Amino acid sequence: MKELILASNSPRRQELMREAGFAFTVRTLDVDESFDDSIPVLEVAEYIAKKKNKAYRKELKDEIILTSDTVVIVEDEILGKPVDEKDAFRMLNSMIGGDHLVISAVCISSVDKEVSFSDIVKVTMNELSEEEIRFYIDKYKPYDKAGAYGVQEWIGMVAINEIKGSYYTVMGLPIHKVYRSLKEDFNILPF
């Protein structure tokens, strides 16, 4: 069986892969995650997941590499990872009391095959006060998360009113689609 490499520092993605039963090794590289503004916002996450995967393919031998990316979209604006507290507040404030999209994309490849896909989820958040938003930012420091929040954290518990789609996609990895692709496209099962 080929070795499965998860190319992600994300503790959430690692947890989801472990919980789904997969054995894998974590390997990371610094990859430029920039993208051209001409790419439609709904395609950006998959573009970046493929870009990350391409960077790893140069080093592949008899392995399978899985890369992923998550974006949050509010009114056609992509919210990446916040650069500071002010940016995190701006992002959260733009989502509170309305809907936004979360897109998690994956690219899986071996030396002779590449498969990529995305999963889109609509998330509705209740209103929160400025004090509540600041509490979340101060306590959870969401600077490593697209859109400045983790669905599994306090803000997800108290502010998310509805999720139309997979909770795990909002966490950062559409594990149901990853499982199916590893099984069907790469003949990898966790047992």
Image (tube, rainbow, N blue to C red):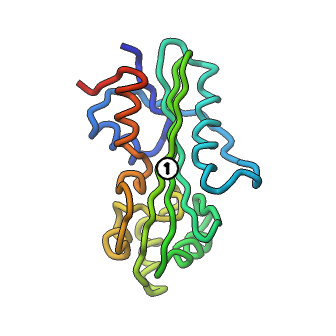
Residue 1, given in percent of the width and then of the height, sits at: 36, 13
**Depicted 131 relative to depicted 156: above or below:** below
- Determine whether, in the image, residue 19 is placed left or right of residue 55: left
**Depicted 129 relative to depicted 115: above or below:** below
Of 6 and 112, nearer the camera is 112
Of 153 and 165, nearer the camera is 165
Residue, x 63% and y 50% (percent of image)? 44
Name the residue tied to disc 1: 104
**Depicted 66 relative to depicted 3: above or below:** below
Q: Residue at the far left: name it.
A: 191
- Determine whether, in the image, residue 143 is placed left or right of residue 184: right
Crowd class of label 1 (few under 14; some 14 to 19; many from 20; radius 10 Å): many
Residue 28, given in percent of the width and then of the height, sits at: 54, 33
Of 131 and 78, nearer the camera is 78
Q: Quadrant of the C terminus?
A: top left
Residue 188, given in percent of the width and then of the height, sits at: 34, 23
Residue 53, given in percent of the width and then of the height, sits at: 58, 31
Residue, x 35% and y 64% (percent of image)? 153
Residue, x 42% and y 61% (percent of image)? 150
Q: Amino acid at mark 1?
A: Ser
Of 142 and 121, nearer the camera is 121
